[in-house]
């Protein structure tokens, strides 16, 4: 048996998320179909992250096994031939049997893109969230400091998730402004579903001064009792930038 990892870029606009689902188009199903066309085997892939419907990736990592012993460059070229234009295999690697794209990762990096302007979006509507209220990125960035380290995010977890661990270690949460664009970069050992979009919604409310600057700090306090009314930013602004591993196939960047 032969084992491969793929670095995948995709525009998630036309997909119902990454993870395979019945009767809808997903990124996973599309990649698996391309691999099956190449190998003539019924292939299932494993991914580092399950991005939401409408979210995107510069550096998703997937792995699979096959009886075929293709060189990595053949896999890259053949899969890109079979895949639609909104999914690209950026690199293929031979990996060990022990490699697991999710379990072997020690961090994932996302960015969230906001256009802070009054005018509605046309060209950028699938890749940025628009917020018309003026945002103070310094207030937002200061609040990010309360996210760093290990915290229990149980208050923002979906009820169905509460059977598993809701603790995550956050390595980076940073806000930068570039003219009318606000970019929020997040790195952690893992993220729960909707975690980034909910936390970033809180940050924008802090930045617009509709929530106090200590909101994140109070979220993790012992007195926290789920009284927050969480909103959620749209998926279109969310990008999986890359995944870090102890090995040669980490991919970070655009």
Image (cartoon, rainbow, N blue to C red):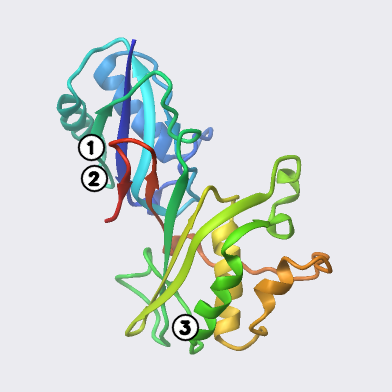
Provide the secondary structure element on which disc 2 rests: loop
Mark 2 touching mark 3, by CB under 8 A?
A: no
Q: CA distance from mark 3 to mark 1?
A: 35 Å
Provide the secondary structure element on which disc 1 rests: strand
Residue 61 in the image, given as x and y percentages of width and height = 37, 38
The C terminus, quarter of image: bottom left
- Residue at image point 51% right, 88% down: 133
Q: CA distance from mark 2 to mark 1?
A: 16 Å
Provide the secondary structure element on which disc 3 rests: helix
Residue 96 in the image, given as x and y percentages of width and height = 35, 21
- Residue at image point 63% right, 83% down: 213
Please indicate, yes or no, whether residue 132 appears anywhere in the rendered image: no
Asked whether, in this view, residue 253 is left or right of residue 108, the answer is left
What is the crowding at mark 1: few (fewer than 14 residues within 10 Å), some, or many (at least 20)? Answer: some
Asked whether, in this view, residue 121 is left or right of residue 173, the answer is left
Give me the disc on residue 85: 2
Q: CA distance from mark 2 to mark 3?
A: 35 Å
- Residue at image point 64% right, 69% down: 231
**Is 54 placed above or below 210 here?**
above
**Is 240 placed above or below 95 here?**
below
Q: For residue 152, what is the image quadrant?
A: bottom right
Sequence order check, earlier mark of 3 and 1: 1
Residue 6 in the image, given as x and y percentages of width and height = 30, 34
Residue highlighted by disc 3: 137
Residue highlighted by disc 1: 91
């Amino acid at each position: 048996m032969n084992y491969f990892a793929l670095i995948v870029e995709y525009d998630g606009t036309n997909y119902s998320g990454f993870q395979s689902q019945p009767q809808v188009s997903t990124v996973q199903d599309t990649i698996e179909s391309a691999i099956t066309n190449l190998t003539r085997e019924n292939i299932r892939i494993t991914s580092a992250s399950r991005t939401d419907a409408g979210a995107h990736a510069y550096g998703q990592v997937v792995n699979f096994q096959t009886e075929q012993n293709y060189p990595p460059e053949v896999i890259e070229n053949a899969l890109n031939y079979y895949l639609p234009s909104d999914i690209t295999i950026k690199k293929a690697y031979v990996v060990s049997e022990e490699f697991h794209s999710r379990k072997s990762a020690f961090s994932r990096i996302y960015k969230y893109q906001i256009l802070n302007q009054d005018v509605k979006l046309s060209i950028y509507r699938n890749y940025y969230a628009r917020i018309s209220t003026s945002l103070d990125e310094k207030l937002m960035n200061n609040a990010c400091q309360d996210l760093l380290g290990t915290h229990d995010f149980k208050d923002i977890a979906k009820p169905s998730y509460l059977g598993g661990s809701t603790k995550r270690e956050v390595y980076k949460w940073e806000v930068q402004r570039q003219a009318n664009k606000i970019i929020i970069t997040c790195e952690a050992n893992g993220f729960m579903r909707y975690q980034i979009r909910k936390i970033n919604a809180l940050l924008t409310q802090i930045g617009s001064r509709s929530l106090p600057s200590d909101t994140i700090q109070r979220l993790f306090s012992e007195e926290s009792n789920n009284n927050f009314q969480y909103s959620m930013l749209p998926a279109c602004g969310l990008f999986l930038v890359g995944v870090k591993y102890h090995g040669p196939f980490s991919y970070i960047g655009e």
